[in-house]
Amino acid sequence: MPLVILLVIVGFVFVGVGAYVVRNLFWSSQGVVIESKLYNAAQSGIEWGMGQIWKNKDNIEADLITIPSGHDVTFLQVRQDNTAEGFGEDMYLALDDLPETESGITLTVRLLDCNYSLAPGVTVSDLPPRVLAGTGSGGTGTPTIPPGTSVIIDPSHFLPLGGGVTSHSFVIRSRATGFGRSTELESMVVVEK
Amino acid sequence: MKKRLVLIAVFTVSLLLILPFGLIRAERSVSAATSINVSTDVWPTWPNPNGRINGMEVWEPATFLSIGRDVISWVYFGTRPSDDGFVSADVYYLVKKSATDGSIHTFEPDIAATDALFIVPGASAIQSPTNSEILTGLRGSSGAPAAVFPEYRDIWLSNNAVGYPNEHFRDNQAWLDLDDWRNFLRGTYSASFKYADTGHAPPQIVWDVDPWLEAFLVNQYTPPSAWVDRVVGIVSTNQGTLQGFEIYPEETAPRAERKWVTVPNPVFRQSIFHSLRKMYAGVFKRLTLMDGPFTVRDVEIDGTWKRILVGTTGLGTPQSVKPQDAWDTLAQAPGLIPQPMPTMEESGRGRIFGVYAYDITQLATTPYASTLKPSWSTTKVNFTHSGRNFSGFYPVNSSNTTDSYNGYSDIKFSVSKPLIGYTAASSARTWHTILLGVDANNLYRWIDANPKDGKNLQNALGAGVFTRPVKLDDNNKIIVASQDEMLTAISDNGTILSAEQVETLYPSRILAAFPPPDYPLQKPLLSSIYVYLSNGSLYRWNLNDGEAPKWIATFQNKKGLPLAPLTDFDISYLNGKTYLAATVAFTYNGASAHQTSGLMSVDLTAVESMDVTDRVFQRDPVAGQEGDIVSSPKNDPIMLVQLQGAKGAYTTGTKEVMASPVFIKEKLYLAYYELTTSKKINLSRLYVIPFASMIGSGNIQKLTDIPGALYELEEQRVVNMFVDSKGNLVLIGEEGETLLSLPTGLEYAGVGSGSAASTFNKMSVVYWKKL
């Protein structure tokens, strides 16, 4: 009898452990599945962000963005070129709809301009790396006139001078939230001439 | 006796019948033209019609070669119907659809009798002026004459208690139909013409963005938002108008539409006399009212980016006394002849000359007086007739102040393009408008003005002359001694040109070059202004460092006559050297009684290393040399090519140079066309000269021995040349067809049929991470 009871108890223990293991396995797998789903959603946000930047590459404000006090990093969301001096404070770029995600997952994507400066005394958290437009990834971006070519300064002499705003860097932050978790990815891209 | 009595009776009756009629006729003769004594001190003047020079027609102004653009413009002039008759013009636009199928579209702009018309009688523009506004503007006010010089006198010619003005611009006038003048300005008066000739002013294309400021003033330059994605053509005509055309290069069938016609203040003072002269003589005359080139640039005024247009009246208008019978002929004062008529002193025929500026920053497709906005102007008037010695200077600006216009009163006329640019001694930019003209003593003069109001910039160089450090002594030897540059007459084998005629036919040229590579500031500022005067002298002016213009050299032919410029010139830097290219006159009446001309390229670095006494160069190619030969003696800094289709000395029929010469990637390009029936020449030529290796390499260098240096198109007439937005040099034929398209090596990142703005063309990932 005691042996039977012992066996039953051991059996229960095995069942319990097995159930625990199975449950853990289930939840781990479920976690991995959820993590994968969130990751994929966030990655689709990154891809979407790249597409939006490429689509609007010649219409994005190239002037330096200066963050005043009282604002957070969302102030750096890409703006539409207002073709005037400085940047239009409210001229955020109109973007296409975010990609669809699985039910239960919320996707948030921010496209942030790296061509910025901070107003004196201002601190902002979670800033993207600062890369000024026109400097490229390492060169000076100075326009040059091809040697042995006309140097007469006239708007009707439109030469391929290069330089100017040769490159513009952006950070894409894509956060997928759901099932009590979140996954965030960040990517920096640069558009160049 | 009876017979005698009958004869006496017949005689008496006849006398009684005829005499009264005779008296009446005598009375009628007296009342048809009554001479009235007037005070000649306010006998008004009219602009004098512009005469031919040595029987020559008026030439179309050569265009400045367009690079990297797919829209160009040019004009053709019509011949005069009589010696002082009107010269008409046709305006053309060409669009090349480089971004799509490369097709060429040539067209004239559409105009209408309802196109917006503006006049500028004072500081502001008036849109669609009424008759009263026009006449009020023409009368001017006391101390501020407008169109009547020396002054408007309302009661001047009086008869039987009726007084008439010296120029009948009263509101109640009935002799002048102002609608005729409006239609004349719009070019809708007659089916035989739309535009008067453009004088020395080639048509211009204005783009949305200045590519030099965009490239070199990153984040500091703001082009006007009203001009985004627009292409606008502007033309000035001797009707007295500036006209604006909206060009639509992207449409399936590109077209252009005129949007506005404006009459700047200095021109408003004279333009009405087109109508008066027509009424008097029965035909329109050629009046050089709006004869000078204009320039459009983006500048900073009070810290704000503005787009401004600055132009001059060019030759301006010499004056003559109003004809004595004009009051009767024009029905201003019917039957009245004022006397005594003064006589114009030939030397005091004087001139009305002006400079004008517009602020077109906000000018959109639909113009308004507030957007086609006069900014400032100056008008100088002087003449002498036996009744009056008159001079006046009338600046107009928003502050209504007349100070600080030093130098303007000295300039008699200016047929050179105003130059606009900036200097930057520190980080602050100072913007300049440089004017180049000739004074009454035939000295060349410059003015350095503020684009905001035309006033002298306070940099101690407000106005001045050009001074050469060498001169000819009594033995005709060149010695070191200062001499102010003077415009001189030309006498060549029977061809006589007065000093003014020389400048008229061969206008002096002024352009700004980008700084040389060793200059510390590599920005498009005014460190290297080049001036090529019609007397053959070349100057460089470093205004950025506050210097005066510095003489480089004087170029003459072997008779000592100037190698005067025919078009704008070009400057280039290569391997540490500076080069000039110019199209110049070689002779004015050479062998076989004809003029020759050619292409000149100069190693300016080598020239400036020479002693100043060695820099008066006398060169011309071997007489009768054909145009496939480059002449440049060993180690000589000057290279010449005679633009001539065949060997020998002969009189050319037609010879036309296409635009200014241009340096592109170590080659020098120039195209011309010649038609000489007697020599069976009907030929277009394109030169692609490797200039650096040919200068100083020998007197007889055959271009046909160098592959790709010379293209000859027999029986084909090139009418235009430009470099398109893909970097191809394109020659256009009479039918608008492409005769030749040659890659120049210029590579553009982006293409566009209008503004060839480069675009971002690649994207790459710098990093990726999980947060």
Image (spheres, rainbow, N blue to C red):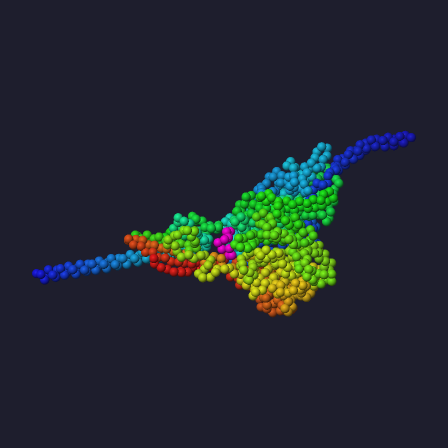
Residue A103's x, y, as percent? 30, 52
In which quadrant is the N terminus of chain A drawn?
bottom left
Q: Residue at x 48, y 50 (%)?
A: A85
In this view, the residue in front, B346 or B730, is: B346
In this view, the residue in front, B392 or B243, is: B392
Instruction: Determine the main secondary structure of the stretch shown in magenta.
Output: loop
Disc tally is 0
Q: Residue at x 72, y 62 (%)?
A: B476
Q: Residue at x 32, y 57 (%)?
A: A39
Residue B270's x, y, as percent? 65, 45
Q: Any magenta on residue B254? A: no
Q: Is residue B574 visible?
A: yes
In this view, the residue in front, B758 or B472, is: B472
Residue A8's x, y, as percent? 12, 60
Check the image and name the residue furthest to the left: A1
Q: Any magenta on residue B216? A: yes
In this view, the residue in front, B396 or B229, is: B396
Check the image and name the residue furthest to the right: B1
| Chain part drawn in magenta | B215-223
Q: Is residue B113 visible?
A: no
